[in-house]
Structures are given as C-alpha cells and as structure tokens.
Amino acid sequence: MHRAPTLWHWVIAGLVVSLAGVGYDVARAMPQRTLTGAMRQITHAATPTPSAGARATTAVQAAVLLQLHDCSGNLRMLHVLHRGSIARHIQLAVIWYVGPVSDSTHIRAALPSWTGTIPLRAAPSAVVQQFASLGHTTTPALLVLDQDGRVRFTTQSPRSSREVAGLRRIIEGLTWIEEL
C-alpha cells in the first residue's frame, strides 16, 4: 500500500532542495584549487556572457603572480605583455599577489597605469602551491593559458634585456597558433 506524501514530506523535500542550492553556491564561491580554475573564476566574473556561438574571448589569457618587493623594478614581463601584437593577442586576466592585504594598495600604485583595469587579487594558497609545483618558487611569475584553458606556458620574470627579447618571441609564438 502506498501512502500519499504528507506536509512533512514536502517540507523535508523543500529543505533538501534548498540545502543543495546553498551547497552549489558555496562550491562556486570557494577558491579554486587549480591555476586554470582560479583564472576561470576571475575571467567569468569579470566578463559578460558571450552570445550563442561566440567564443568567450579571442585573446589568450595570462596571469602574473608577484609580491610588493617585485614592484621596485622587476616587472619586465608586464611591459612585454603590453607591446604591439602581444597586447592584442594576450589578455592579462588577473594579477595575483603574495603578502598581506595591506600590500594591495602599494602594489596597485607601483603597477603600470595600463593595468588599472586588471583585477588585483590575493593569491589563493592553492595557486601559490601550483606555481611552486611548476618550479616557480620566487616571484614574479607569468602563466599563459590557451583558449581551451590549459596551461600553455609559465616562466619567471626575465632578468636581462636578452631574456626579455626571448620572452617576447616565445609569447608571439604561442599566440599565432590561436588565430586559426
């Protein structure tokens, strides 16, 4: 024999559905555990939803991990990202920083003016750990994703003008494939 659902059954079902919705919202708001997940979280929050059939972006996404003491002259990679065709093909999606929240104001003031619209965020510990697992235990470091959100390239900041020129060539080589 089958009994009809009582009011209590409906109340419990409603609570279960509500809790599931809360759980979903909490999972979306949690810091991502991967570099690509953390970047997607920022780029999706910062960009409008594309129209049907359109790509989310035509630019390759990049991120920089730095700390306050890097801003005294070790930001050559930012200058590379802002030059010529590279600026058209690579979008700096986020600048992550390591250090206290109070550093953010000083970092923003020391960054080039063109980065004023780029989100500046405290680096989640999972992001710092993943950079370290890729061999980047010092800052600044650059991360470049391809259009499918896969890690395409990571590097430390160049130390010489020769390394800057090499970095520019590498990044230009990464972007021409994306134009297909």
Image (cartoon, helix red, strand yellow):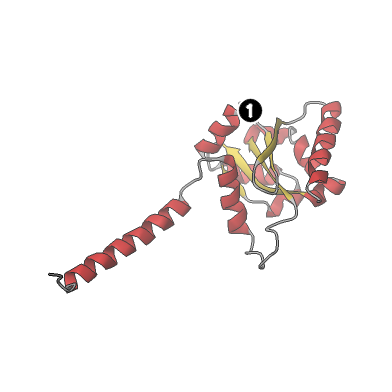
Q: Can residue 98 be seen in the rendering of this structure?
A: yes
**Residue holding disc 1:** 136
Residue shown at 70%/63% (left/top)? 54
User: Percent position (x, y) of residue 93?
Assistant: 67, 49
User: Percent position (x, y) of residue 120?
Assistant: 62, 47
User: Percent position (x, y) of residue 91?
Assistant: 73, 50
Q: Can residue 121 be seen in the rendering of this structure?
A: no
Residue shown at 85%/35% (left/top)? 169
Q: Nearer the viewer, residue 159 or 14?
A: 14
- Inspect the image, locate mark 1, and give the three-letter code of the amino acid beneath it: His
Say which quarter of the image contains residue 74.
Answer: top right
Taking 175 as reference, is 93 left or right?
left
User: How would you rate the neighbour count of disc 1 (Cα within 10 Å): few for under 14, some for 14-19, many for 20 or more?
Assistant: some
Quadrant where the N terminus is found in the figure: bottom left
Residue at the limit of the structure toward the front, as seen here: 1
Residue shown at 65%/42% (left/top)? 150
Q: Nearer the viewer, residue 7 or 37?
A: 7
User: Percent position (x, y) of residue 3?
Assistant: 14, 71
Q: Nearer the viewer, residue 101 or 170?
A: 170
Secondary structure category for the residue under label 1? loop
